[in-house]
Structure formats: structure tokens, C-alpha cells
Amino acid sequence: MRIAFLADIHGNLFALEAVLADCRACRVEGYVFLGDLVMIGSRPREVFQTLEALKPLAWIKGNTDGWLEEIQPGFVPSSPQEAEILGLFEYGARHLDEAMRTALSSKPMAQRLDLGGAPVMICHGSPCSYSQGIRPGMAAEELDACLGPGSFRELVCAHTHIPMNFIHRGVRFLNFGSVSTPTEGGHHASYGILDLDARRDMRFRQVPFDLEPYARDMKQTGFPGMERVLRRYAGQA
Ligand SMILES: [Fe+2]
């Protein structure tokens, strides 16, 4: 069985559709979503609907999903940057209905799965916090603190958008990168496939998506983060 791990889609339906076409070509049979559905993209509602239709094996809450619950009516931003970020969250909240927001809010922050007879921990940031980024090169004590209680064979996380694959204290740490926004700039989607029938082969996939229709869509929908997104794809932010 081949399982796709998708993370940090951030409302980018165009990147998600490119990934799902690649998944079909790779004969993926199951999906796991590691959180961060909203922000940085114009179509959070359609991304939610698309994910829901996939009936994922697991769906984790990311920090931007959690922040949706924390927006307080009447909050006054104290800087232009805060105002910009608030605008992105208000856009996300407006485009998800109450049932979708409730469903997102009920997702777990971490979950232990049995995949192919081996325990796998999945989370957005770390098993301890959806905001705690795990990065290659972290000190052993920092990695120990990220692991939390329990034992597992693989830890699959997201959040940093930085692909990684290393072993620490017998646990393989994996991050397959971001569907919407690769850290190295450019407009391609990163995700991963775990092949349980081929000795747990891990494939890091990169799939280009067309930027022009996405830019057009951001303009048509009035998405407030268009300039920020285009700067990021040009490697300027
Ligand atoms: Fe995140």
C-alpha cells in the first residue's frame, strides 16, 4: 500500500490538485494530512472539501488551523505586519463555514498510527506542540525534548516546510516539505509517499504547478496576501 503525506497546503488548491494528479499516477491508496490548511492561499474552502472527499487515514491540526479559533472579535493589530496576518486569517475564517471550522478545531495535534505493522507518530510541529519546528541539525537534547513520551519507528512532521530525513535514537525523523510553499522558492509542491510494500521506501516528490491561474484566482477572489505569496514564489520573501 502506498500512502501520501501532505502538509502545509495553506489554501493553495492549484498545488493540491497537481499533487493529487501525481498521487494518482503513483497509485497512492491512502492519504495523511499533517495540518495547516489555511493562510497563504485563496481557496481554503475548496481545499477542505477536497481533503474531506479523500477520506484521509488521519488529519492533524496545524498551528494556523489552531489560530483560526483564537481570533478574537475586536482585536486591534499593533503593527502593519500584524494587520496583514490578521487579514489572512479573517479571509480563511470567512471562507470556511462553521461546520468546517468546528471540524478543523476537533482534529488532533498528534496521532500514533500503525502503518504496515510499525508504529508511526504523525504531528504538525512535534508530538508536544504544533508550533515546535523540528529542523535538521538540531542538538540531540533538543530532539529528545521533541520526541515526547511513547516509542515509535518513524516520526512524520511538517510546519517548517523544510524536507528532512534522518535517524535519531532509532527513530526516523521525516518531513516531506510543503504542498503550497517550498522553502527554496519556486512554484512546486513537495510531499511524500511511504510504500509499505517496498520495504517502507520513502519517496520525496516535487510537483510543479502553474502559477498564472493561481495568481489570477488570488486576484479574482480578493485574497489579501497575493503580493506576499508572489514574492515568496519568486524567492524574495
Ligand atoms: Fe505550520
Image: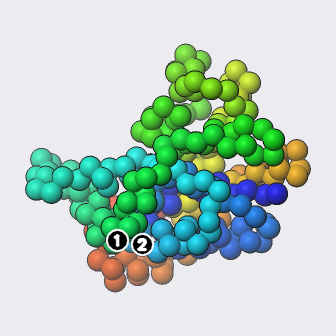
Q: Is residue 233 left or right of residue 207?
A: left
Which residue corresponds to mark 2? 45
Q: Position of residue 105 (x, y in %)?
A: 39, 53
Q: Are marks 2 and 1 in contact (CB under 8 Å)?
A: yes
**Which label sits on residue 97?**
1
Q: Position of residue 72 (x, y in %)?
A: 18, 52
> Could you tell me if residue 214 is visible in this image?
yes
Which quadrant of the structure image shows residue 178? bottom right
Element carrying mark 2: helix
Q: Position of residue 230 (x, y in %)?
A: 40, 66
Q: Is residue 29 left or right of residue 225?
A: right
Residue type of the residue flagged with mark 2: Arg
Which quadrant of the structure image shows residue 174? top right
Quarter of the image with the N terminus in it:
bottom right
> Could you tell me if residue 205 is visible in this image?
no
**Residue at the top extreme of this rendering:** 141
**Residue at the right extreme of this rendering:** 198
The answer to which of marks 2 and 1 sits earlier in the sequence is 2
Q: Position of residue 156 (x, y in %)?
A: 63, 42
User: Which residue occupies 29% across, 59% down?
Assistant: 89
**Crowd rating for badge 2 (residues with CA inside 10 Å; few <14, some 14–19, many 20+):** some
User: Which residue occupies 12% across, 47% down?
Assistant: 78
User: Which residue occupies 43% across, 60% down?
Assistant: 103
Residue type of the residue flagged with mark 1: Asp
Q: Nearer the viewer, residue 79 or 24?
A: 24
Q: From mark 2 to mark 1, how far is it between C-alphas? A: 8 Å
User: Which residue occupies 45% across, 35% down?
Assistant: 129
Q: Nearer the viewer, residue 119 or 19?
A: 119
